[in-house]
Amino acid sequence: MVKVRPVVVIARNRRNRRLVTIVPLSTTEPDSLEDHHHALANNPLPGREAIRCWAKCDMLTTVSLARLDRYKVGRGQYAVPMLPPDDFEAIRRAVAKALDLTHI
């Protein structure tokens, strides 16, 4: 992926506090729905609540916090949307499925 995209931060690196593991969000529904995809109950992005949003949990990436920014909602205005606990836990389960860690 080479474009600006909303993400969910799911973990911080234990040894390097500047690194985080992220799951990308997309408004494109997966071609074939798999266990590692999660449809969010509500789109967390301000002004886009009516647009269906998917967490693509098989596309994990570790990035520097320097590469992340807040969501721009207006001129000089930014937001840091938060997911409800149910969606966040569902994303964690889908990541475990993508990594085949469900047997642990």
Image: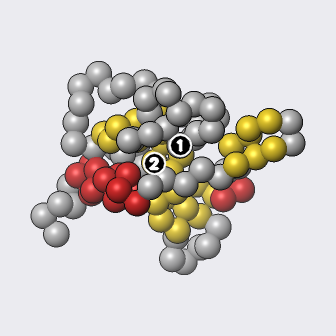
Which quadrant of the figure contains the C terminus? bottom left
Mark 2: secondary structure: strand
| Amino acid carrying mark 2 in the image | Val
Taking the image as shown, residue 82 lies to the left or right of residue 102, namely right
In the rendered structure, find residue 44 and report the number of the disc placed on it.
1
Judge the density around disc 1: few (<14), some (14-19), many (≥20) Cα neighbours within 10 Å. many
Amino acid type assigned to the residue bearing label 1 in the image: Pro
The residue drawn where x is 60% and y is 50% is: 81
Pinpoint residue 10: horizontal percent, then vertical percent. Answer: 46, 60
Q: Which mark is residue 21?
A: none
- Outermost residue on the right side: it is 76
Residue 23, which numbered label? 2
Front residue of this view, candidates 95 and 41: 41
Mark 1 or 2, which is nearer the eye?
1
Q: Residue at x 40, y 60 (%)?
A: 85
> Given the current orientation, which residue lies at the most extreme left position?
103
Name the side, left or right, on which 86 lies relative to 2. Answer: left
What kind of element bears circle 1? loop
Residue 84 lies, with reference to residue 59, above or below; the image says: below
Camera sees residue 92: no
Give how far across and how far down residue 20 sits, in percent.
55, 61
Residue displayed at 38% across by 41% down: 41
Estimate the spatial distance between the alpha carbons at disc 1 and disc 2, rounded to whole Å. 14 Å
If you read the primary sequence from the N terminus, does the residue marked by circle 1 or circle 2 appear first? 2
Residue 43 location (% of width, % of height)? 49, 38
Within 10 Å of the Cα at label 2, are there few (<14), some (14-19), or many (20+) other Cα atoms? many
Q: Nearer the viewer, residue 15 or 93?
A: 93
Report if the CB atoms under discs 1 and 2 are less than 8 Å apart. Answer: no
Please identify the quarter of the rendering in which residue 5 is found.
top right
Q: Where, by quadrant of the figure, is residue 73 drawn?
A: top right
